[in-house]
């Protein structure tokens, strides 16, 4: 295989997907790569990230590894600058990185609560801050996809920290969407129900696999929104398994 250039042609859209080493993020990255976009994949998991990039490249996609912990403010801005230098300014940001803990409020330590909020809510804030000024300045529009959860709309026990973070990001996206309409920047909230990812334990995945959506299904929905006519915007999409949520 020929060595790929790290410099992207100016006409090719640049996509940044966080939490892209596996699951939904990896499938979204692969979906955008299938359109011929330059896709920057980020994750804290270096080995898995390199594997994801390799798999996309083997299919002919343009994928690049940019390790990043979205909780690290300086690190996020360094990565955003590195992506812009190597590929060009980001046209589409996919805020997907997320963690959870299935615990009730009283059994969730403050440190764990802080970590979940920092990853699922503050992380998207930092990534958006890092790329949004360029989107506005270039006057070419842009996209911000926030991968949320049905937990932001429904009440599920033993999910206090995760629900608080996702509900906060949902609210943030609503306000940001109105602030950016004049700049033709689309802010899309994606709220999937149960998806078969490593966020669930192996036992839960085996038990409920028939009740869960596949990560690729979420990626296809994101791509469908991205490919809508220019005079149309989808503000929010709710995706649920055909058999309904797992209570």
Image: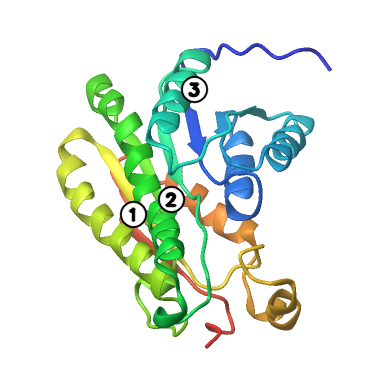
* 3D distance between C-alphas at marks 2 and 3: 24 Å
| Circle 1 or circle 3, nearest the eye | 3
Please say if 108 is above or below 119: below
Between disc 2 and disc 3, whose residue precedes? 3
Label 1 and label 2: CA atoms lie apart by 7 Å
Look at the image and tell me in which quarter the N terminus lies: top right
| 166 over 140 or under it: above or below | below
Residue 105 in percent (x, y) is at 40, 79
Judged left or right of residue 106, residue 245 is right
**Residue 83, label in figure:** 3
Residue in the picture at 30% in, 55% down: 235
Q: Earlier in the sequence, mark 1 or mark 3?
A: 3
Mark number displayed over residue 234: 1
How many residues crowd mark 2 within 10 Å: few (<14), some (14–19), many (20+)? Answer: some
In which quadrant of the rendered view does residue 214 lie? bottom right
Task: State how many labels appear.
Answer: 3
- Proximity of marks 1 and 2: CB atoms separated by less than 8 Å: yes
Which circle marks residue 225 in the picture? 2
Q: Position of residue 170 (x, y in %)?
A: 31, 61
């Amino acid at each position: 295989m020929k060595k790929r250039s790290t410099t992207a042609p100016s006409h090719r859209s640049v996509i940044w997907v966080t939490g892209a080493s596996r699951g939904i993020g990896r499938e979204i990255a692969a979906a955008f790569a299938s359109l011929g976009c330059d896709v920057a994949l980020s994750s804290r998991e270096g080995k898995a990230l390199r594997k994801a990039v390799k798999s996309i490249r083997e299919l002919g996609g343009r994928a690049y590894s940019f390790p990043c912990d979205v909780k690290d403010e300086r690190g996020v801005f360094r990565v955003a600058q590195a992506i812009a230098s190597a590929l060009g300014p980001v046209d589409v940001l996919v805020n997907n990185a997320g963690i959870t803990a299935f615990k009730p409020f009283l059994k969730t330590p403050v440190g764990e609560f802080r970590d979940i909020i920092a990853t699922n809510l503050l992380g998207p804030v930092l990534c958006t801050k890092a790329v949004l000024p360029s989107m506005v300045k270039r006057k070419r529009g842009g996209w911000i996809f926030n991968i949320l959860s049905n937990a932001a709309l429904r009440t599920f026990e033993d999910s206090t920290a995760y629900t608080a973070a996702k509900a906060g990001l949902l609210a943030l996206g609503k306000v940001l969407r109105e602030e950016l309409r004049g700049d033709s920047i689309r802010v899309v909230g994606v709220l999937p129900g149960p998806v078969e990812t490593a966020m669930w334990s192996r036992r839960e995945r085996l038990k409920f696999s028939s009740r869960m959506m596949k990560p690729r299904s979420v990626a296809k929905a994101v791509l469908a929104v991205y490919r809508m006519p220019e005079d149309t915007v989808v503000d929010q999409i709710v995706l649920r398994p055909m058999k309904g949520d797992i209570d």
